Amino acid sequence: MSVPDTFDSDLTRAQLGLAAVVALVGAVLTLPAVQSVLYGALVGTPSILQWGIVSAVIAAVGVVRERQELLLLGVVVFVVLGVFVGPVVGGVYAHTDMATQVQQDATRLDTLPNTSTENVRVLPRSVSDNYAQSSMQYPQYRLTGSDIAYHNGSYAWSHGLAPDNFMVAWFGTQRGALYVDMTTTQKRVQVEERTFTHGRGQLFFDSYQYQQVLHSPLKRHNWETTFNARANGTSYIAHSTTVYDWKFRLAPIPQLYATPRHGSVELMRSDGSIESLSPEAARSSPLLRGQNFYPYELTMFKVESMQYVNGALNKWFWKEDVLAIADLPEAGNRWPIVVPTDGDDPELTYFVATEPTGSGNGVYEVWTIDGQTGAIGVQGYDESQIGPQKAVDFVERRPQVNRLSNADAIAPVPVVKGETLYWHVKVVPRSRSGVVYTAFVNAESGDVTLVEGTEPIYAFLTQSEFENVQDETDDRAGGTTVTVVVTNADGEIVGTRNVTVPEGGGVSINVRDRTANNSTAQAS
């Protein structure tokens, strides 16, 4: 029987061949995205491959025996088990397996890792992004997303300087990196000009992601962990990868499943040379000293797997002792929250707070994960602690904050002093042009300590003397306190002051422009 040159769709073989070539070229040009999908489907979800092979065998038998019902059965097996049921069951197997591992490996903590008293995560990411954007002096370039990096003995929000338009991205290169000091409320920005042969934001074969996938095609690349850094005179870009271990479970459905683990740290120098480091080698690398490279996604997979510690049915129906990840304010941080902690060397620790499912009663466990080794610990509480969302609510109810009509309390970060957990909340203008106040909310008592500036933050953590911003209501009953926020020409906060207006009084603000040697007045 001859094969027709055309099909019912009127597509010729030449047209189909052209479409195949276009698809192939598209796949080659978008290799990082294609590799991510294929690796996730074929390696991260082995049930698709398993039931695909089973379906192919059934269909082959149907062809040999000329039995159409076997062909149909093969299709049904693949669609039902390979596409729908298999991935769900494989996910359950992987989570229950990981829950058992976490139970065995997790250390029960008497106290959480104490926050570093030298490098405190003070500056919220949104304010840092504003500082970084206002410091950009490079036309045709943009800032990449930021992540925490150890830089010049301190911690900073790290951005890449990436090409901003198609032609520059195609023919140009990454121009360097920009670092915003996260350990102060002040604007401290440092730009490192450096040409990267294969950088972030570049297109096609010259891009950082493309070259990394070519170098390590059999790994899941965690692009969300990508950061720029410089150490020992070497500028580089790095990110983490995840690999999977295949396992088999016989019941209730005989199936392969995959459990993730940290695969490597992929490090690219500015000249384009790539070094793939095992987790152990990365921990001893002088270039990665002080950095965090344990995958965020793997961290959350481990903690969320503890929902299955008493079985999938309990997780779905009875929910006994099933944890839930604590809510965070919509604008701000995401779990895990990365915090500099005390240690012999600079250290970053991931924090994840959990609460009982459906209770809304607050945090009852805090999980910690080492930012390099992935070592996991958990601090349990007999009495529930105030969670990050409620801590923000407590700060917003403080009179000094509540009276600010154009400011938000955002970005709660866990801070540990001694045996006490606090939520470090920042009060910032809605323009994200600076930090008005920072607050420490005691997670046990709900007490709020409100401070201005950077020095009181470190004084609070070292138990030195500091000035708590008081309510100022004891001897000023009937008056109104006005907070004056002063900004510079760029809209960045340069100072604040509380002024109490007696009952029945008014406010007159004189603004003097010294450069023009004149003044204006506004009254309200």
Image (cartoon, helix red, strand yellow):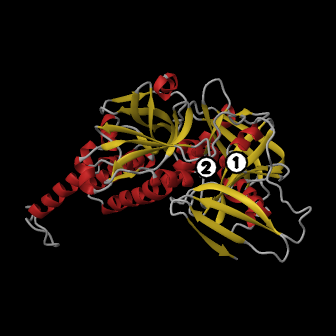
Label whose residue precedes the other's in the sequence (1 or 2): 2
| The C terminus, quarter of image | bottom right
Q: In the rendered image of this protein, does residue 203 appear above or below residue 6?
A: above
Question: Observer-nearest residue: 194 or 224?
Answer: 194
* Number of residues whose C-alpha sits closer than 10 Å to that of mark 1, classed few (under 14), some (14–19) or many (20 or more): many
Let me know if residue 53 appears in the view: no
Give the crowd class for mark 2: few <14, some 14-19, many >=20 residues within 10 Å: some
Give residue 473's position: percent from left, percent from top.
Answer: 88, 63
Q: CA distance from mark 1 to mark 2?
A: 8 Å
Residue 233 sits in quarter: top left
Q: Nearer the viewer, residue 316 or 85?
A: 316
Label 2, on which residue? Answer: 335
Is residue 453 shown to the viewer in this render? yes
| Residue at horizontal 64 percent and vertical 45 percent from the top | 122
Q: Quadrant of residue 460?
A: top right
Residue 45 position in % (x across, y down): 45, 47
Dot 2: what SS? loop
- Give the amino acid type for the residue marked by disc 1 in the picture: Ala
Q: Nearer the viewer, residue 402 or 446?
A: 402
Which part of the image, by quadrant, shows the N terminus?
Answer: bottom left
* Residue nearest the observer in this picture, 457 or 296: 457
Quick check: marks 1 and 2 in contact, CB under 8 Å?
yes
Q: Which mark is residue 47?
A: none
Left or right side of 129 for 427: right
- The residue to which callout 1 is attached is 353
Decide if residue 484 is on the left or right side of residue 24. Answer: right
The tally of labels here is 2
Report the amino acid beneath label 2: Trp
Q: Secondary structure at mark 1?
A: strand
Q: At 77% from the left edge and 75% from the top edge, which residue is drawn?
A: 506
x, y percentage for residue 44?
45, 44
